[in-house]
Image (spheres, grey):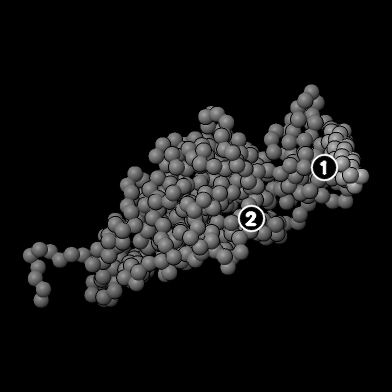
Amino acid sequence: MSDASRQTTQGKSEFNRDHLWVKSLKQLTEKVAAPTLVVEGKLVRMVGLTLEAVGCQAPVGARCIVKGPQGADVEAEVVGFAGDKLFLMPTGRIHGLTPNAKVIPTDKVYDVPVGKELLGRVLSGTGEPLDGLGKLKCRQRQPIYGRVINPLMRAPIRQPLDVGVKAINSLLTVGRGQRMGLFAGSGVGKSVLLGMMTRFTTADVIVVGLIGERGREVKEFIENILGPQGLSRAVVVAAPADDAPVVRLHGAALATSIAEYFRDQGLNVLLLMDSLTRYAQAQREIALAIGEPPATKGYPPSVFAKIPQLVERAGNGQEQGGSITAFYTVLAEGDDTNDPISDAARAILDGHVVLSRELAEAGHYPAIDVEASISRAMTEIVTPEHLKSAQRFKQVYSKYQQQRDLISVGAYQNGSDSATDEAIKFYPQLVKFLQQGMNEAVNIHSSIKLLQSVLNPAPNPGQTAG
């Protein structure tokens, strides 16, 4: 071997030896690297459900652990800050906390397990199973606050969605990707109507968010109204009224995130959220507790920012993708549909269905007030013949309502007005058309045919054309 070859071989050997040394040193350095230090704070004030901590830092939305006595730890979420103080809101019970308790930031945010394994399951507002069927076997997780979709990238609303309720299918046709409000007072049948839609809709997946309602209603809704048929292709998220306000907010966001997952899989999703009012009230509780000033009838400005942020996550995805058709119930307290939350919801949703207490008390179900209801996307998704029939139905129905008092006391004389005469003739058929049993499904094609036949009855077999 020549001197040059010997030097080259020796150089390679030294290089390999040095490389191995560097690699070994790097591995040892990684093993002995000091872990990230977590700066612990302490609890200095607690008023109501608001906790104040000093000595630590964490971003808004992060989770912290407050160390209680004898291992009674409380999980809390950062909801605001002022100077060196962090404002936290607990996600569970807070009994037993003491002054100067340790506050440990975790740098974690809430996410949700997603996958087809969620179908048929009932989750809490924090994503934990409530149905006693064991742990969730989902392999994927995603943040509960989703992602923003460029509005120009969304597919337009072009196809109707069959919800199985003939009054909605025919007179208030809903499109895939549309967001509707369901305005109702207490006890007028909104839960029954939601249950009918979950069982009868042609959507691929149903996601139900029960936010801020009575705990008793959760079990009744799942067993009696939703039923095994509806639950088999549904995911239910329940955050009842006794949950902490941040959990109620999480429940709505979590249900929406699950719907977004199935939409991104190319499926048509029906999202039913009961109720948007309770969601707004949860945000009001948090905002007022941390010092945000009330603005409109006791609601702070952040409430009116949160509602569109939640609602705008529903809708169509990109072209050739899936859709989220959403119904948000709005509780009309005292049957007042002009309260701040109702006004805000009506302004940003694509239509609204109003349930009437007067109709409900008269035994008219579903108690849909067709005069006060509207679907803003209907003109783009139905045929001209269908639209003409729906408009004529509303005109005749409205004409009768205008003259109802005169007709009921016998003050109206037949022949005085041809439009009123026509309304009197057809009114019993119109009322019958609007009624539907809670276990009776009517698809969209049958709904349209029935609508067209109500005002254009077939001639009697014995009649001949004149």
Kindly identify the amino acid type of the residue bearing the numbered disc 1.
Glu
Instruction: From the viewer's perspective, tell me whether residue 32 is left or right of residue 354.
Output: right
Q: Which mark is residue 52?
A: 1
How far is the residue under mark 1 from the one under mark 2? Answer: 30 Å
Crowdedness near tag 2: few (<14), some (14–19) or many (≥20) residues, C-alpha within 10 Å = few
Left or right of 36, for residue 307: left
In this rendering, the answer to whether 234 lies above or below 422 is above
Residue 233 locus on image (x, y percent): 45, 42
Label 2: which residue? 147
In which quadrant of the rendered image does the N terminus lie?
top right
Q: Left or right: 444 with respect to 315?
A: left
- The residue closer to the viewer here, 408 or 258, is 258
The residue sitting at 39% across, 55% down in the picture is 162
Q: In this view of the protein, can residue 33 be seen by the observer?
A: no
- Mark 1 secondary-structure assignment: strand
Tag count: 2
When the figure is inspected, residue 334 is found, relative to residue 424, above or below; the finding is above
Residue 74 picture location, percent across and down = 74, 33
The quarter holding residue 3 reads top right
Which is nearer the N-term, disc 1 or disc 2? 1
219 vs 393: above or below:
above
**Residue shown at 44%/65% (left/top)?**
158
Q: Position of residue 303 (x, y in %)?
A: 67, 56
For numbered disc 2, what is the local secondary structure?
Answer: loop
**Point 73% across, 36% down: residue:** 75
Q: Which amino acid does label 2 sit on?
A: Arg
Mark identifier at residue 145: none
> Which quarter of the figure is the C terminus placed in?
bottom left
Residue 95, given in percent of the width and then of the height, sits at 74, 30
Mark 1: few/some/many CA within 10 Å (<14, 14-19, 20+): many
Q: Can residue 83 be seen in this view?
A: yes
Q: Which residue lies furthest to the front in this view?
A: 1
